[in-house]
Image (cartoon, rainbow, N blue to C red):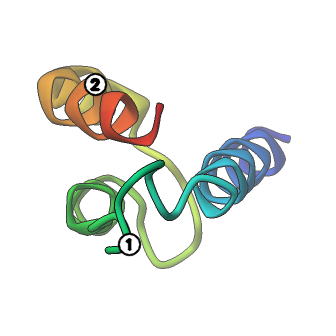
Amino acid sequence: MMKNYSIIFLVSVVLSSCFTSVPKGNKSPINHSEWTTLVQKHVNKAGFVNYKGFIKDSVLLNKYLAKLS
């Protein structure tokens, strides 16, 4: 059951980032390297998310989320 929540979480974050891929007034796309780093570090090959790891990397996660907003 936890795996389903992990997938839902990841899909919702990724989809929300797709709708804001180009900032207003800027023609260059957003660099998603922070998200890539976080996913590679905290999601295993089976799709399980290490939420405590995301919390430990909250500075990087919040930086990425601020960029998307």
Q: Quadrant of residue 7?
A: bottom right
Callout 2 secondary element: helix
Callout 1 secondary element: loop
Taking depth in this image into account, of 7 and 1 the one nearest to the observer is 7
Name the residue rendered at 35%, 60% in the picture: 26
Marks 2 and 1: which is nearer the front?
Answer: 1
Name the residue rendered at 47%, 31% in the picture: 69
Q: Give neighbour class at mark 2: few <14, some 14-19, many 20+ (Cα, 10 Å).
A: few
Q: Is residue 35 above or below residue 53?
A: below
| Mark 2–mark 1 CB contact (< 8 Å) | no
Q: Which amino acid, by three-letter code, is at mark 2?
A: Asn
Q: Which amino acid, by three-letter code, is at mark 1?
A: Lys
- In the rendered image, residue 66, in percent from the top left (x then y), is placed at 33, 28
Name the residue carrying label 1: 27
Name the residue carrying label 2: 62
- In the rendered image, residue 14, in percent from the top left (x then y), is placed at 61, 58
- In the rendered image, residue 61, in percent from the top left (x then y), is placed at 28, 34
Name the residue rendered at 79%, 47% in the picture: 8
Q: Give neighbour class at mark 1: few <14, some 14-19, many 20+ (Cα, 10 Å).
A: few
In the picture, measured across the screen, residue 67 lies left or right of residue 21, that is: left
Name the residue rendered at 42%, 31% in the picture: 51
Q: Quadrant of residue 36?
A: bottom left
- In the rendered image, residue 39, in percent from the top left (x then y), is placed at 36, 61
